Amino acid sequence: MPAVDLVAVGALGALLVVAYRHPPRAVEAVVSVLAAAVVVLTGLVDVDRTVEVVRELLPVVAFLVAILVVAQVCARAGLFEAAGGLLRGGGPVRLLTVAFLVAAAVTAVLSLDATVVLLTPVVVAAARAAGVAERPGAYACLRMANSASLLLPVSNLTNLLAVPSLDLTFAGFAAAMAPVLVVVLLVEYAGLRLFFRRDLSGAAASEVAPAPPLPVVPTAVVLVMLVGFAATSPLGVDPCWVAGAAAVVLVAWGRARRLLSVPDAAAAAHPEFALLVLALGVVVAAIGDGFLGEAVAGVVPAGTGFWALLGIAALATALANVLTNLSATLLLVPLVAPLGDVAVLAALVGLNVGSGLTLSGSLANLLWRRTLVAQDGRAPLPEFHRVSLALTPVSLVAAVGVLSLWR
């Protein structure tokens, strides 16, 4: 490996450490800026290429910022507690089933971060209040945070990063991925039922207080936002504009009801994470134009039959679990895009479902574990990997099998 490439690898390593360790916000921002600056100043990426990468990523980052604000206002308004109210009553099987479905819906509409950070504590609290095991519901949130993010372009940053390489509208993407998601959900649900069968054999939950009502305005804004994504996609309107409008409306509504202030909204946007995503784009561009890009391009399958698509999904899974799925998306999608839409969708199967294989596969995995620990819950790594190794390969093969029928 040329010495200059070691600079890019070191910069990527620094960014991944920041992503894994989640240091103070100022540290995350400084490391992100320095990592990007190093690869530019050393000539690994020229200024024109840097500007190009940043311009390509800005709509994705803007969407991320907006949807995080939307999710935070919804949380403060009680949307997740109201959704958690659906978990009340019945036994542990019902709690798992409802948690599974709610987590899938939250992931699809509000992104996986909302599922792991905002919904998981609600599910854990509901299980404790009902006197049933919390592990099945908690793992349902984890699995859905990755696997249910297949459905919509806005469900995961990986999807948004891949959309420019696809000749699909918002509705077209959803139509292509809906049957894939259905099969994945069936596999994941059956797997959770089997894996946690002992936890699910407990007695029925005790009676609890009635669920709080859904907050009308946040619920309506989220639904209008979702319709807006579909309606404006054929017109070439980027989702960040629709999400941004929803965020503005909800922040104004939240301020009027003293749910949050403008500084609260700014903090909820996590600008330091936006810088991290931009820095990853610049650093991965340096690596992709160098030795790693050449190495990965050399092993990308050439066709779009079942085995070729499975190979693409497996390659995406491997890269996601080594580099995180965001970095892997930036590296792999441009390499498979010439093979057509189905190849890019197969890569997304690996980048989304496959990222659940190990703790390092996606930031959602790390955030989920941190959230459980903060709730005084247990998230032992051996159990995490037993669940992931049991479910992820089966889901991956099933998803690719369905996708291979799509043309």
Image (cartoon, grey):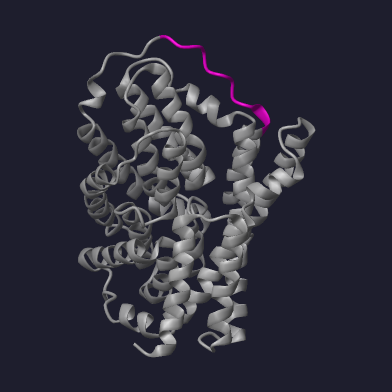
Magenta residues (range):
207-217
Q: Splitting the image into 4 quarters, where does residue 296 fall?
A: bottom left
The answer, for residue 228, to whether it is visible in the render is no
Q: Is residue 209 magenta?
A: yes
Q: Is residue 171 magenta?
A: no
- Give the answer, above or below, for where 335 lies relative to 23: below
Q: Classify the position of the C terminus by image quarter.
A: bottom left
- Give the answer, above or below, for where 46 lies relative to 391: below
- Give the answer, above or below, for where 83 lies relative to 131: below
The answer, for residue 42, to whether it is visible in the render is yes
| Front in this rendered view, residue 241 or 203 | 203
Where residue 345 sits: x, y (%)?
A: 38, 61
Taking the spot 46% from the left edge, 22% from the top edge, the residue there is 86
Where residue 350 sits: x, y (%)?
A: 33, 59
Where residue 52 sits: x, y (%)?
A: 59, 78
| Front in this rendered view, residue 276 or 79 | 276
Extreme residue in the right direction: 256
Q: Splitting the image into 4 quarters, where does residue 222 fall?
A: top right
Overall secondary structure of the magenta section: loop
Left or right of 55 on screen, residue 292: left
Q: Classify the position of the N terminus by image quarter.
A: bottom left
Taking the spot 39% from the left edge, 54% from the top edge, the residue there is 176
Taking the spot 40% from the left edge, 67% from the top edge, the residue there is 328
| Front in this rendered view, residue 7 or 132 | 7
Extreme residue in the top direction: 207
Left or right of 70 on screen, residue 377: left
